[in-house]
Amino acid sequence: MFKELPDCYYETTPRLICPENPTPKHILYLSNLDDQKFLRFSIKYLYVYKKSIPVNDLKSSLSKVLSYYYPLAGRLRISEENEDKLEVDCNGEGALFAEAFMSITVDEFMQVSKWPNMSWRKKLLCRVDAQSFLGIPPLVIQITNLSCGGMILCISINHCICDAIGTSQFLHAWAHLQTKPTVDLSVLPFHSRHVLEPRDPPQTTFSHPEFTNTTPDLDLSLTLQSQPLVPSCLTFTPSHILRLKRLCVPSLKCTSFEALASHVWRCWIKALNPHSSLKIKLLFSANIRNSIEPKLPKGYYGNGFVLGCAETTVTELVNSNMHHGVKLVQNAKATLTDDYVKSMVDFLEENRVKPDLSSTLVISPWSKLGLEDLDFGEGKPLQMGPLASEIYCLFLPVVGDLHAVKVLVSVPEKIIGKFEHHMINDLYEEDGDELIKDGLELEEKEQL
């Protein structure tokens, strides 16, 4: 399934790109949503372009955009006031930029890019020698020019500073200054994170099951990570998603995310086949920029999401129809009110804990954020996604189809066939006409 990529050749050593203009030198406070322990890593994005952009032009526009997003040119550090918290030293040291060449064409790379391989990290993103993730610049970029004249753009951006929406905002600002350097940005970054400060004293008014371990005697995540994992990547077209939603009507109306999240969770559990009485969870990131009071300011690029938590037992999820799982997701979304978010921020002030991943599928939606529309002057990308597949599930955009979703998740190698079987065939679980079902199954499998 996987093809080994050729080695990258670096003609020059990676260099730091500093902001073009002098920037404020200060310490940026990070909210409790920013510096959560499970976000202390960098998200790695991969873009494939048919035609490359001159590297010096990209460096110049990057320097310009860092004058606006100057915290990304700073360095993370442990807070002097609270050793459990992180902060950003906005010192203007710069983002790390690497240029490489790989003897492969865009078409050849596209053949294997559906299944991101963990080994690609060593070839498509320059290695930074650091004792901890605090020693890695918050922003690391590598341009890999290809033998056909195309390029691969990899961006590593520290999750404590940006979420996916904030990253999209930054990347589009960079592309804007690359293509229209004399035109002001339409959205200016809002830096301060004090809008999400905890109350004094903290008031935790909800139980926050996303952080509570309900299965202390069994850690399904350790079982998963002890096995060889392989990526599964399936594209759900608008017709597939509509079919899922129709499994719930007329008794329940739902969104595309609710239907697809419930479907993936159920198929994942079916394939893993844990004990029937096991309590299981689905965690998913939910944007709270407009759901809290006051709303987060326009241009806010920090972490503006919380985790929704749906929970049930294996038996209840597997033996019930789509309606049950969708209703659980809807109920989880409905709890994410202004009061709930404030309670979570306060909870994290007193409890520096990670989410409960013991028997949990985590879904992070990257679709419909504009990540796939990034144009530096030579057209939109042919491919957009993560640099590597993880145990977390990503809902990715499909270039050229706004309403399609690509589902990417790594699962144990021994169950991938079973997982993909359920992902495809459970679309038809309630169809009565077997002849019609078989015909549709074949057609949809070919699309998937």
Image (spheres, rainbow, N blue to C red):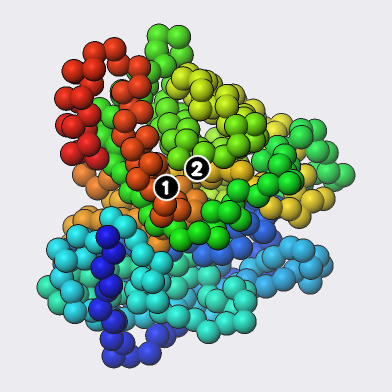
Give the image location of residue 321, x and y in percent: 46, 20
Quarter containing the N terminus: bottom left
Q: Nearer the viewer, residue 156 or 327?
A: 327
- Crowding around mark 1 (Cα neighbors within 10 Å: few <14, some 14 to 19, many 20+) is some
Residue 80, horizontal then vertical, whole percent: 79, 72
Check the image and name the residue furthest to the top: 250
The kind of residue on which mark 1 rests is: Ile
- Point out the residue furthest to the bottom here: 12
Residue, far right: 201
Residue carrying label 1: 415
- Residue 71 visible? The answer is yes
Residue 445 location, x and y as percent?
22, 36
The image position of residue 271, as x and y in percent, is: 45, 40
Q: Are marks 2 and 1 in contact (CB under 8 Å)?
A: yes
Residue that appears at 20% across and 38% down: 447
Instruction: Tell me which corner region of the image, top left, top right, bottom left or bottom right, holds residue 296.
Output: top right
Quadrant in the rendering for residue 126: bottom left
Q: In the rendered view, tell whether residue 425 sits above or below residue 407.
A: above
Q: Is residue 422 left or right of residue 265?
A: left
Determine the residue positioned at 18% across, 18% down.
435
Q: Tag 1 or tag 2, which sits nearer the N-term?
A: 2
Kindly identify the residue that appears in the image at 14 percent across and 63 percent down: 107
Left or right? Give the position of 8 relative to 96. left
- Measured in 3D between alpha carbons, the distance from the residue under mark 2 to the one under mark 1, in whole angstroms, is 7 Å
Which residue reaches farthest left? 148
Could you tell me which quadrant the C terminus lies in?
A: top left
- Badge 2 crowding class, 10 Å Cα cut-off, few under 14, some 14 to 19, many 20 or more, is some
Q: Amino acid at mark 2?
A: Leu
Residue bearing mark 2:
272
